[in-house]
Amino acid sequence: MNKNIIAIVFGLIVLSSVVIAVEMTKPQVCQDYFNIVDVNHDGRVNTLDMSVVKTNLGRRDCNSENNWCNEADVNFDGWISFQDMDIVRGWLYKKC
Ligand SMILES: [Ca+2]
Ligand SMILES: [Ca+2]
């Protein structure tokens, strides 16, 4: 009986630790993505970020040496496509 209670308490402690860990990482993950789609790093995702992506649209030379085409290659696949536009558009005016 006591072993069952100890096992249940231990299980709850482990479970709550996992829940806390997940909750603590959520905002950081959100912030990490936000920092990528906030292309001009002004703390907002808006049409200015879309403009940077649009200006670089079609470039196929994105890499770490040119800072992923002025950071417009938000999915880091090496070129600026409508996929990058869609990603930034999906974050428009959002916050973490
Ligand atoms: Ca911005
Ligand atoms: Ca891309």
Image (cartoon, helix red, strand yellow):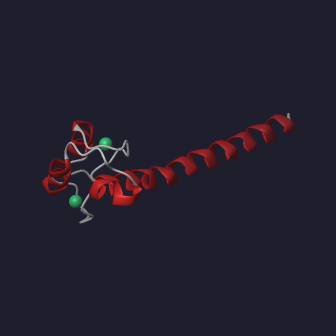
Q: Which residue is depicted at the point 26% across and 42% down?
A: 84
Whether residue 38 appears in this view of the structure is no
Q: Quadrant of residue 78?
A: top left
Q: Which residue is depicted at the point 44% across and 51% down?
A: 29
- Locate the C terminus by quadrant: bottom left
Considering only vertical position in the picture, is 68 above or below 8? below
Q: Residue furthest front?
A: 61
Measured as percent of width and height from the top left, residue 17 is found at 63, 49
Q: Which residue is depicted at the point 73% across and 43% down?
A: 9
Relative to 11, is 25 on the left or the right?
Answer: left
Relative to 56, is 61 on the left or the right?
Answer: right
Which residue is nearer to you in this view: 9 or 76?
Answer: 76
- Locate the N terminus by quadrant: top right
Total labels drawn: 0
Q: Which residue is depicted at the point 81% across and 34% down?
A: 4
Considering only vertical position in the picture, is 44 above or below 3? below
Relative to 28, is 50 on the left or the right?
Answer: left
Measured as percent of width and height from the top left, residue 63 is found at 38, 52
Which residue is nearer to you in this view: 4 or 54?
Answer: 54
Which residue is nearer to you in this view: 78 or 86?
Answer: 78
Ligand 2's image quarter is top left
Whether residue 59 appears in this view of the structure is yes
Which residue is nearer to you in this view: 82 or 23?
Answer: 82
Measured as percent of width and height from the top left, residue 14 is found at 69, 44
